[in-house]
Image (cartoon, grey):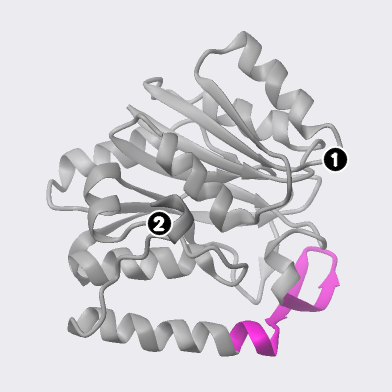
């Protein structure tokens, strides 16, 4: 079974479509763990209604805001699937995404990590050109075997800067550069919203028509460089890639 962890906050306008895109997957042996990070716009009520009609949906509600990293960690820790992957509450997946990722594990028995490509879209679901790229590797689509990754890598860092990219790099550091398989198909659609968590650490330079240019903030760049130095130490064996926040031990 695959556990899909959906971290969400104030996604009332998009959460129904997001979760439905998972429930409608051609691969049906899955559960959706929705972690609502103290939404105040009705997101929780929408998710609870979905859970009432489909037993594959499980809901966790943070009474106070805890952030994306900690929310994902909560989902990981209660997941029951052999495999784990992720989706954000304002994004959607094509209905064959999970099936193709599982097929990649069957085709590549040594793989530890399977990802797909994504496109960023506007509210009309039109694709955007982001920093002169139409499609990109989708880090948050990463799928992995739960037990072996938790054992060697632990959980997400519970901070707001590049926690998904950091987790991805730590998995590769733990299992080697050849441990990932990338499906070069656009199976994930990420919605562009100016006030999304992603853009809280970025500055939008230009947003006109279907073209978007952004730059990361100086603080985000500095923190990512610090993480990159740690990743280098992890790859060389000087530092362990395993991070397990104390309050989740």
The first of marks 1 and 2 along the sequence is 1
- Residue 94 marker: none
Q: Quadrant of residue 172?
A: bottom left
Q: Can you see residue 187?
A: no
Which residue shows up at 62% across the image and 67% down it? 160
Magenta region includes residue 249: no
Vertical placement of residue 126 versus 236, above or below? above
* Secondary structure mostly taken by the magenta-highlighted segment of the chain: strand
| Mark 1 surroundings within 10 Å by alpha-carbon count, few (fewer than 14), some (14 through 19), many (20 or more) | few
Q: Determine the secondary structure under disc 2.
A: loop
Percent x, y of residue 224: 52, 82
User: Which residue, given by chain and number where applicable, does mark 2 sit on?
Assistant: 155
Q: Give the range drawn in magenta.
A: 202-221
Which residue shows up at 22% across the image and 67% down it? 174
**Cβ–Cβ below 8 Å for labels 1 and 2?**
no
Q: Residue furthest left?
A: 109
Task: Give the Cα separation between the discs numbered 1 and 2.
Answer: 27 Å
Percent x, y of residue 215: 70, 82
Which residue shows up at 59% across the image and 34% down it? 34
Percent x, y of residue 232: 30, 86
Q: Quadrant of residue 230?
A: bottom left
Which residue shows up at 41% across the image and 84% down it? 228
Q: Determine the secondary structure under disc 1.
A: loop
User: Which residue, given by chain and number where applicable, does mark 1 sit on?
Assistant: 40
Left or right of residue 88: residue 225:
left
Residue nearer the viewer, 194 or 120: 194
Rendered-image quadrant of the N terminus:
top left
Percent x, y of residue 247: 48, 55
Magenta region includes residue 210: yes
């Amino acid at each position: 079974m695959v556990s899909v962890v959906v971290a969400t906050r104030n996604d009332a306008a998009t959460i129904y479509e997001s979760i439905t895109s998972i429930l409608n997957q051609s691969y049906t042996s899955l559960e959706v763990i929705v972690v609502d990070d103290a939404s105040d716009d009705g997101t929780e009520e929408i998710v609870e209604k979905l859970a009432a009609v489909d037993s594959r949906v499980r809901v966790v509600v943070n009474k106070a805001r805890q952030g994306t990293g900690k929310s994902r960690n909560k989902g990981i820790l209660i997941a029951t699937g052999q495999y784990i992957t992720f989706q954000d509450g304002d994004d959607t997946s094509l209905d064959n995404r999970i099936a193709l990722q599982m097929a990649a594990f069957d085709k590549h028995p040594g793989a530890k990590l399977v990802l797909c490509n994504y496109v960023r879209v506007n509210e009309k679901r039109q694709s955007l050109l982001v920093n002169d790229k139409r499609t990109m590797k989708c880090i948050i689509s990463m799928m992995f075997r739960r037990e072996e990754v938790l054992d060697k890598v632990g959980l997400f860092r519970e901070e707001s800067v590049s926690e998904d990219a950091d987790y991805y790099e730590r998995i590769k550091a733990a299992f080697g550069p050849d441990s990932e398989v990338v499906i070069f198909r656009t199976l994930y659609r990420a919605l562009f919203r100016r006030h999304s968590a992603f853009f809280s650490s970025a500055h939008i330079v230009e947003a006109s028509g279907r073209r978007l240019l952004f730059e990361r903030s100086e603080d985000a760049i500095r923190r990512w460089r610090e993480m990159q130095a740690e990743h280098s130490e992890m790859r060389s064996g000087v530092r362990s890639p395993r991070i397990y926040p104390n309050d989740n031990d």
